[in-house]
Amino acid sequence: MSYVLAIDPGKDGALAMLSDSDLHVYRMPVTRTVIGRSRRFVVDPLGVWALMQTLTHADIVIIEGVGGRPKQGAASAFVFGFGTALFYMASVALNLKIETVQPAVWKRWMKLPGKNDKTAKAMTLKRAEERFPEARSQFYTDRGRALDGCADAALMAAWGREQVLKEGRFIGNVAARLTTATRIW
């Protein structure tokens, strides 16, 4: 049985573990902290580590390749990048293979609109529900609020299983490059 772990980084993101028969979605572990003069939710390093230690049976980790956004402040960009880096470091520490996929790549494969389309989030949720009808409840809170990060992670996991594991289309194995680099040290 193969396992693909896909990660939509960021405080509203999620992790999805897809096997041949099952999908489990985990909301992003977050904690509240003070940044500047305000209290904000950020990705929780200890929560990430604890969760990643339970998911070491993944054959591959797919991490969404993300970057700064226009009009995003420096502090916000740093916090977002820090949260993303936590998953790379946890994956390397746990000796998991890593692949990075740009949002446009997996969304094009899923036939989803780009981020500038106002219907993008609704379409992502709809596609995730169609692809994983038994897991529909994992894409919504108990009160019915949509968790588009959970849908993103689930669809990325499907992309990873079909395009990386089955087709062997590795984009660039970060873990292999990092392992080679650590041998030099």
Image (spheres, helix red, strand yellow):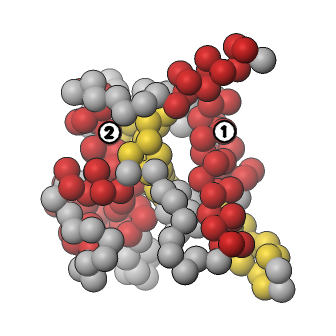
- Left or right, 130 with respect to 23, comes to left
Residue 95 appears in the picture as rendered: no
The residue located at (61%, 26%) in the rendering is 178
Give the x, y percent position of residue 74.
68, 72
Secondary element at image label 2: helix
Q: Which mark is residue 117?
A: none
Front-lying residue, 166 or 26:
166
Instruction: Please report whichever mark, 1 or 2, sits nearer to the chain's N-terminal start.
Output: 1
The kind of residue tagged 1 is Met
Q: Which residue is mark 1?
A: 89
The residue located at (59%, 35%) in the rendering is 91
The residue located at (70%, 20%) in the rendering is 182
- Left or right, 58 with respect to 111, comes to right
Residue 87 appears in the picture as rendered: yes
Tell me if residue 29 comes above or below residue 74 in the rendering.
above
Q: Which mark is residue 160?
A: 2
Tell me if residue 34 comes above or below residue 80 in the rendering.
below
Secondary element at image label 1: helix
Badges 1 and 2: C-beta atoms under 8 Å apart? no
Give the x, y percent position of residue 167.
22, 27
The kind of residue tagged 2 is Gly
Give the x, y percent position of residue 51.
61, 46
- Left or right, 110 with respect to 5, comes to left
Category of crowding for the residue at label 1, using alpha-carbon neighbours closer than 10 angstroms: few (below 14), some (14–19), many (at least 20): few
User: The N terminus appears in which quarter of the rendering?
Assistant: top left
Give the x, y percent position of residue 145.
40, 80
Front-lying residue, 138 or 106:
106
